[in-house]
Amino acid sequence: MPKNQPPTPPTGEIVLHQTEDCRTRVECRFVDETLWLSQALIAELFQITVPTVNEHLKSIFEEGEVRHGPTTRKFRIVRREGPREVEREIEHYNEELEIEARQLSGNSG
């Protein structure tokens, strides 16, 4: 996404996914036939830490396995931080990067 373009407002479907142990439910953003997840949601989905996801994504981009532009998108998210609700621009990653993160996490499913 070009730097001068505003973040995409939240649109599209929200899809819920459960891991094999049926414990984790992750809210996924599905827009224009593409699945988008934040680093926090990728970590929850694959049951790894956010810093681990960050490391994997950084490595994927540095090695040129995937280009940053077409695989990332910012969405405005409203979330609770302490007693207040705040709006934040959160970078999300499409399924191409999620597959790479899954492989790096050792999670083949």
Image (cartoon, rainbow, N blue to C red):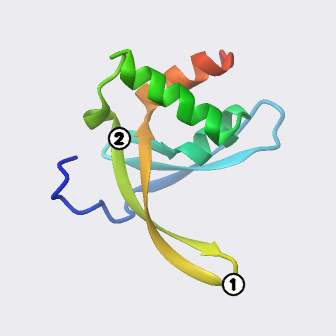
Which residue type carries mark 1? Answer: Pro
Query: Quick one: SS at disc 2?
Result: strand
Q: Where is residue 86 in the image (x, y as percent from the top left)?
A: 52, 77
Mark 1 — residue? 83
- Mark 1 → mark 2, Cα distance in angstroms: 30 Å
Q: Quadrant of the C terminus?
A: top right
Q: In this view, does 54 lie to the left or right of 21?
A: left
Q: Is residue 64 left or right of residue 29?
A: left
Q: Which mark is residue 72?
A: 2
Q: Residue at x 33, y 17 (%)?
A: 64
Callout 1 crowding tier (Cα within 10 Å): few <14, some 14–19, many ≥20: few
Q: Where is residue 27 in the image (x, y as percent from the top left)?
A: 59, 52
Q: Residue at x 47, y 22 (%)?
A: 59
Q: Do the residues labelled 1 and 2 touch (CB within 8 Å)?
A: no
Q: Which of marks 1 and 2 is nearer the N terminus?
A: 2
Asked whether 49 or 109 is in front, the reply is 49
Q: Which mark is residue 38?
A: none
Q: Looking at the rendering, which quadrant does residue 56 occupy?
A: top right
Is residue 41 placed above or below 104 in the rendered structure?
A: below
Q: Is residue 54 left or right of residue 67?
A: right
Is residue 43 placed above or below 10 in the rendered structure?
A: above
Q: Is residue 21 left or right of residue 109?
A: right
Which residue, as the protein is rendered here, is positioned at the far bottom?
83
Query: Quick one: SS at disc 1?
Result: loop
Q: Residue at x 84, y 33 (%)?
A: 21
Is residue 68 placed above or below 60 in the rendered structure?
A: below
Number of numbered discs present? 2
